[in-house]
Amino acid sequence: MNKVAIFPGSFDPFTKGHHDIVMRSLELFDKVIIGIGYNSTKKNRYFDIDLMVGKIKSVYADIPEVEVLVYNDLTSRVSKEHGAQFLVRGLRNTTDFEYENTISQMNRYLNEELETVFLITSPEFAAISSTIIREVHRFGGKVAEFLPYEL
């Protein structure tokens, strides 16, 4: 049986920290699906979703074990539909853990076959967040150093 994991998020934008989690996940799983979900608590995306899908696909063009999926549903349901037994989440700090722990418990309630795996962010990426990258970009700051692709 193949071990399939979904790495869900809004990825607005997808950062080098996210890329690090994907690459490390490939050491644990046979296939990693980057699931770009619509977050109902966020009104509008900053970066167009089609642009982000294209950029992410370009990063993994030579790695067939990575797929990109856009969805607007419960992550637990999408995981089951795509044969994923695992969710992968990156943790930068204890605040991330508190938030992610609650979500993982609900996902497990909704799909008891779904296991969440937390990977601690590599130190060099711990300060990177999509929120900060969006803000810097919005005001004309340079963000290329934090992204695994050209904007």
Image (cartoon, helix red, strand yellow):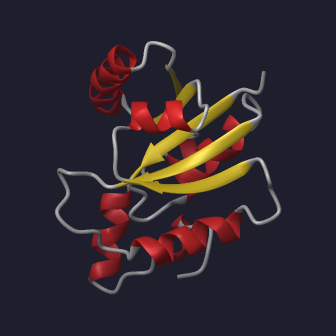
Q: Position of residue 10 (x, y in %)?
A: 38, 55
Q: Position of residue 120 (x, y in %)?
A: 53, 30
Question: Which residue shows up at 61% across the image and 46% down it?
Answer: 33
Q: Is residue 20 left or right of residue 13?
A: right
Q: Position of residue 116 (x, y in %)?
A: 49, 22
Q: Is residue 107 visible?
A: yes
Q: Which of 146 and 68 lies nearest the eye of the viewer?
A: 68
Question: Which residue shows up at 27% across the image and 52% down it?
Answer: 39
Question: Which residue shows up at 72% across the image and 39% down it?
Answer: 31
Q: Is residue 102 above or below residue 58?
A: above
Q: Position of residue 51 (x, y in %)?
A: 49, 78
Q: Is residue 5 above or below residue 35?
A: above
The N terminus lies in quadrant: top right
Q: Is residue 4 above or below residue 9?
A: above
Q: Residue furthest bottom?
A: 140
Q: Which of 139 and 14 lies nearest the eye of the viewer?
A: 14
Q: Is residue 78 left or right of residue 57?
A: left
Q: Is residue 113 left or right of residue 102?
A: right
Question: Which residue shows up at 59% across the image and 80% down it?
Answer: 150
Q: How many marks?
A: 0
Q: Is residue 89 visible?
A: no
Q: Quadrant of residue 77?
A: top left
Q: Residue furthest front?
A: 81
Q: Which of 136 and 87 lies nearest the eye of the viewer?
A: 87
